[in-house]
Image (cartoon, rainbow, N blue to C red):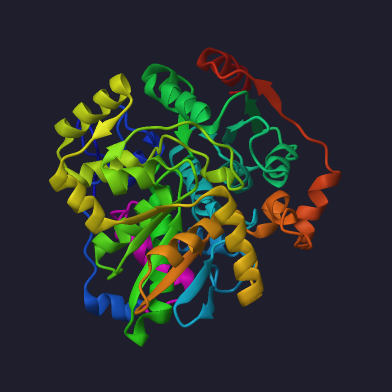
Amino acid sequence: MRYISTRGQVSPIGFTDAILMGLADDGGLLVPEHIPQVSDATLKQWQRLTYPELALEVFSLYMNDEIPREDLKKLVDDSYSTFRHEDVTPLRRLDDGRYVLELFHGPTFAFKDIALQFLGNLYSYVSRKTNSIIHILGATSGDTGASAIEGVRGKEGIRICILHPHQKVSKVQELQMTTVDDVNVLNLAVEGTFDDCQRIIKELFADVSFKHQYHLRAINSINIARILAQTVYYFYAYFQIANAGHKINFSIPTGNFGDIFAGYLAQRMGLPIHKLILATNENNILARFVNEGVYQPGNFRGTYSPSMDIQVASNFERYLFYLYGEDADTITSLMTQFKAEGRIVITEDALKQVQADFSAYSVKNEDCLNTISEYYEKYDYLLDPHTACGAAASDKLAESDEVTVVLATAHPAKFDEAIRLLKISQSYPRQIEELFDKLQIQTVVSGISEEIKEQLVKFF
């Protein structure tokens, strides 16, 4: 297994080099040179595995034995031992056609923990084995930052800087990041949106000399290890209900296209997912692309689901690569066009393929809250606002003879500002309650790359 760039200007590299490179040096995204195929017989064998055992098997397909199996097993076991539920990602049945996959039982109560606990341990392992300097740079719309910091705080040989949009994340998300008082952690609050943070990250990684001089490593889902880790829970959830013989859908709230791309990859590997339902909030560039064939940012909208308040999806290029038959020249041309014109328009034939791959629905802000109320009253189950978008899309797009698994991406306590609007009271988990008594440590900066560079030079 080797890794190549969507833009074709990087020689194939191994897994370790791929995770260290993060964003490809030619500005593209790294993808596996081929997608491993999992046979029906293997799928049947995997049904009996625990979550860590399944993760070990999936990761092994992508690593070329670069990490000895015993070492990889320890990395996996250490990563998922931090979760509060023995199943890691338990599946909750609401009724015959609705399940919720709870992805929030990790240290920071968000689905990002599933990939970032592993990636943090993986970076630490690589640093020790190769004597590499690991300077992590990431952007967050709320959950990635806390999960990434938790994954590497205090680890020898690693420093991490996280950019988040100032006052545009929930209070709990902000506290989870900014109350960490470790010398290897820097929080920069950017005056702007998450798209500004993401743009700065890509600009800094695209400056290859700066990237190499300061040993920058990626923690965002531009890092292929993030995507690989997230494919595992699609397999795990599917296996728990597959024997019933239903058509099984997954409804995925997404803003950056990483979580749903992981589902797409699992499907390409051989997992017989019926429908991948893409749910957005009112920042609906991805839903408009699936339904109309035009990828073009609209006006930014602040919503009750702030982690999805994203206009430019950093993983979208990976999907385009497969949509256009792995033609790097075409992808380079499309991304150059997008940078120059701010939009991509695909052909009718390409749109038919997109609509075969995904169904999509954009959830209005008030409909998000209404869905939380409806599920709380009907099922006595409290959704966070992002999961509510997935549930609302499922209710619109799933057929009566299908079973849909909604991905629950965060614990509702992380977004109590929205929950309180519905006159629903919830108690905070102890770990979240304790955050409110801690001192915050963050630096507010403008959205200019040069100012961020100055901060990074001082920190690293």
Q: Quadrant of residue 345?
A: top left
The foreground one among 243 and 230 is 243
Q: Would you say 313 lies left or right of 145 here?
A: left
Which residue is at a point 39% across and 46% down the rendered structure image?
257
Q: Nearer the viewer, residue 435 or 3?
A: 435
In magenta, the rendered stretch is 47-70
Q: Is residue 90 magenta?
A: no
Residue at point 37%, 33% (across, down): 23
Task: Using the image, determine if residue 249 lies above or below residue 47.
Answer: above
Residue 14 shows in this picture: no
**Relative height, residue 229 to residue 43 (above, below):** above
Q: Residue at x 53, y 52 (%)?
A: 112
Instruction: Determine if the magenta segment contains residue 52.
Output: yes
| Quarter where residue 270 is shown | bottom left
Residue 35, percent from left and from top: 23, 55
In this rendering, position of residue 174 left or right of residue 101: right
Give the image location of residue 30, x and y in percent: 30, 40
Query: Residue 312's x, y, as percent?
Result: 41, 34
286 to 87, vertically: above or below: above
